Image (cartoon, grey):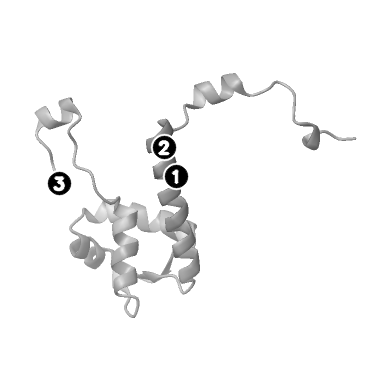
Amino acid sequence: MPVRIEEFEAGELPSGPSVPEQILTYLYANWEKAFTRSEIATGIDEDPNTVGTALSRLKQRNLVRHKGEYWAITNDLDRVADAYALHSITERLDEDDGGIEPDEWDAAAPDEPHPSEQDE
């Protein structure tokens, strides 16, 4: 959904579940069916290309299944629950501490490997 340029410039962007979250929620709610990419896009009101990219990434993480043109949630619902829990915890920690700044992380990393990583 487009936003006005004023909202974009001010950083007042819509927030809500990400496309992958929406896809998993939709497929979980309809676990007994498989859908085409277009059907999923219509069901969650998102762009089909964005949905296609998200589906490919979810498949790499074994969170969805794919046969022909159809997609369904994985049979391993514990895997979905674990992925959601990890995502929720990561978001909460990022809100608490502002997230990890890669440059700061690299600057603080020691030059020598940890003793457990050294060959004896």
Rendered position, 85 above or below 119: below
Q: Residue furthest right?
A: 120
Res. 1 mark: 3
Kind of element beneath mark 2:
helix
* The image quarter in which residue 51 lies: bottom left
Query: Is residue 96 something one can see in this rendering?
Result: yes
Marked residue nearer the N-terminal end (3 or 1): 3
Coordinates of residue 67 in the picture (x, y in percent): 41, 72
Q: Amino acid at mark 3?
A: Met
Res. 64 mark: none
Camera-near label (3 vs 2) is 2
Judging by the rendered image, the residue that carries numbered circle 1 is 90
Res. 94 mark: 2
Residue at the spot x=23%, y=64% of the render? Answer: 38
Which one is nearer the viewer's eye here, 105 or 66?
105
Q: Amino acid at mark 1?
A: Thr
Contact? badges 1 and 2 (CB < 8 Å): yes
Rendered position, 87 above or below 6: below
Coordinates of residue 2 in the picture (x, y in percent): 13, 41
Coordinates of residue 9 in the picture (x, y in percent): 16, 25
Marked residue nearer the N-terminal end (3 or 2): 3
Q: Separation of disc 3 and disc 1 at Cα?
A: 26 Å
Rendered position, 92 above or below 83: above
Viewport quadrant of the C terminus: top right
Residue at the spot x=49%, y=60% of the render? Answer: 82
